[in-house]
Amino acid sequence: MFRLVGLQLITIGLLAAAAWAVWGSVPAFSLLLGGLSYVVPTFVAVLLLKFLRPYPALAGSGFILAETLKIILCLVLMILSFMLYGSLHFIAYFIGLLSASHFAFLFFLKVHRHGK
């Protein structure tokens, strides 16, 4: 799971660098904020699940707690991004958010199943 978070960070970093090269700093920073709005809650959820790993009786409730916490943190970070960074470029922010959130689906569908 930590590997997935690392790959999400690399993806967001590469996309932000490409956005900076093409459109400038505001869309690049917006894309970075969008990606981090999803990656940071994912990292917190992974840490919580790793902490609860020795307790198999808590696996189900731990997963629900981790996902609930992830959704709440994602919403809080999205709201804070829009409130604190006034010149946020929405399309770039949304691309960053979608690329981070859907990276797991693309990674597991294409890499682990060899494109099938």
Image (cartoon, rainbow, N blue to C red):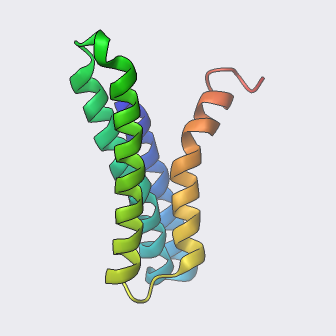
Quadrant of the rendering where the C terminus is positioned: top right
Residue at left offset 40%, top offset 60%: 37
Residue 102, position as x, y percentages in the image? 59, 46
**Residue 78 can be seen, yes or no:** yes
Q: Position of residue 107 (x, y in %)?
A: 59, 34
111 sits to left or right of 11: right
User: Is the N terminus in the top left, top right, bottom left or bottom right quadrant?
Assistant: top left
Is 4 situated above or below 14? above
At x 26%, y 34%, the residue is: 47
Q: Residue furthest bottom?
A: 87
Q: Answer whether residue 13 is visible to the viewer in this image.
A: no
Q: How many marks?
A: 0
**Residue at the extreme right:** 116
Q: Quadrant of residue 67?
A: top left
The answer to whether residue 58 is left or right of residue 114 is left
Which is nearer the eye, 67 or 27? 67
Q: Residue at x 38, y 46 (%)?
A: 70
Q: In this rendering, is residue 19 above or below 48?
A: below
Q: Does 89 appear above or below 48?
A: below
Q: Position of residue 31 (x, y in %)?
A: 48, 68
Residue at image position (37%, 54%) is 72
Q: Position of residue 45 (x, y in %)?
A: 33, 38
78 and 99: which one is in front? Answer: 78
